[in-house]
Amino acid sequence: FHPFGLMTLIQPPADEVLDRAAALLAAGKLIAIPTETVYGLAANAWDRDAVAKIFAAKQRPATNPLIVHIAAIDQMDRAVMMPLAPELQRQLDCVVDLWPGPLTVVLPRSNRISDVVTAGRDTVAVRIPSHPVALRLLRRCPFPIAAPSANRSNYVSPTMAEHCDGAMDQPGIHQFIEMVIDGGDCDFGVESTIVALRPEGPRLLRPGGVAAETLAERFGITVPQLTGEQLPGLHLTGTPLTDAVAESAAEAGVTADGTAAMLAPGMMKEHYSPTTPLMLYDTARPMSLPARAGRIAFKPLSVQEAACYAAVETLSDSGDLHEVAKGLFAALRRLDHAELDLIVIDCCEPVGIGMAIMDRIHRAAATHSK
Ligand code: TXA
Ligand code: MG
């Protein structure tokens, strides 16, 4: 308890609320649910009509598959073709103790999963979230839950229940959402790490809440082996990791059934973008600021520097990257509503959770620099 009210105490939703949520899902409705990464827009993953509503609500291209959530490892066969080939089982065994948590694995799909979920692919993305409310809901459902982030396609992902109501940022989406379950602010604030488990070895598709270094260590390989850094042109700084892989693959002329198909489909297109132009802060290149510029700082600015901005969001007192990740999307949304001409944002080393932070920032900035 904080005497100054800086922390809101969230009452965990009552059992009756979760019973109602499970009943809505069983009836083919969409609801917004908390997870430890971001809020998800949830539907019964076995109900193709319900899943189709997710794509309509988000205006998401039908080619971009969804993540399927399960409550426990013994529910894998609700989404994945079991038993796994021995090599895939071996890879899963390396990382399975990171569940429940912000890790998604891509594996051969079960036929029980709607092909709307997998966008026609023969693989499915699956994870066990660690948010207690998500787990309580999943345990009530006799089906797996498909849930992308509960935002309009390409807008900033929601990390607070109030981001999900749709009124502000996502006109149209709210008429599809029957219920928002408030589980408090998301702990990680960036989406799950996605790793494809493949006969030829694991491949990182999206950096996220679990550090690439952690995965590489579990698999007994190096980060470059996991990220495909051996591809021509890939470098860890400057360009978002997965875009860099995509570009290198494109340069190398690799087609959809080759290297490019290893990427999370949709990651090339996803931008996480605010409407306001976003620019990365570059110490080496001082920039002239428009009259109304905002700044997202990873640690407190000097008084002189802060005075240059119409609005400043400070994500951490100490530059702690977990705090930065946790507050990042909410700060982007707030500044996007502050009628600014430009948002300037700090950078960090793409190490640990910093890799996910820089990936999202590069994507958010990319729309405006092109
Ligand atoms: O943290 C998260 O993962 C959140 C919460 C709600 O769980 N969900 C989330 O979903 O980020 P979404 O839809 O915003 O991102 C799903 C990503 C997309 O980039 C998609 O292309 C990729 O997962 N994906 C899904 N199925 C795939 C598959 N079979 N192969 C490769 N990538 C896949
Ligand atoms: Mg998303």
Image (spheres, grey):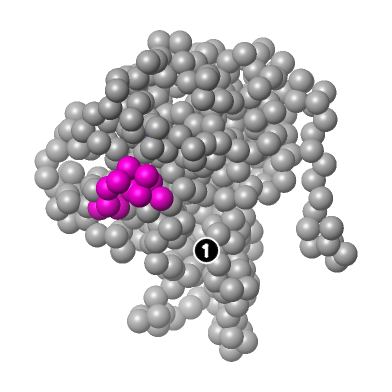
Residue 309 x %, y %: 58, 77
Total marks placed: 1
Closer to the camera in the image, 304 or 42? 42
Residue under the image location 63 percent in, 24 percent down:
138
Above or below residue 277? Residue 344 is below
Residue placed farthest to the left in the image? 252
Residue 67 x %, y %: 47, 30
The amino acid type found where label 1 is placed reads Leu
Secondary structure, magenta segment, majority class = helix
Quarter of the N terminus within the rendering = bottom right
Under tag 1, what secondary structure?
A: helix
Q: Is residue 184 left or right of residue 328?
A: right
Picture quadrant of residue 339: bottom right
Residue 247 seen in the current view: no
Q: Is residue 321 left or right of residue 167?
A: left
Is residue 100 in the magenta section? no
Above or below residue 211? Residue 200 is above
Residue 57 x %, y %: 56, 29
Residue under the image location 53 percent in, 19 percent down:
75
Residue under the image location 63 percent in, 73 percent down:
317
Write down the residue under mark 1: 321
Residue 78 x %, y %: 49, 16
Residue placed farthest to the bottom in the image? 304
Ligand 1 within 8 Å, label 1 CB: no
Picture quadrant of residue 193: top left
Give, as a single range, the part of the protein colored magenta: 214-224
Quarter of the C terminus within the rendering = bottom left
Above or below residue 207? Residue 66 is above
Residue under the image location 19 percent in, 28 percent down:
257
Is residue 223 in the magenta section? yes
Residue 101 seen in the current view: yes
Residue placed farthest to the right in the image? 3
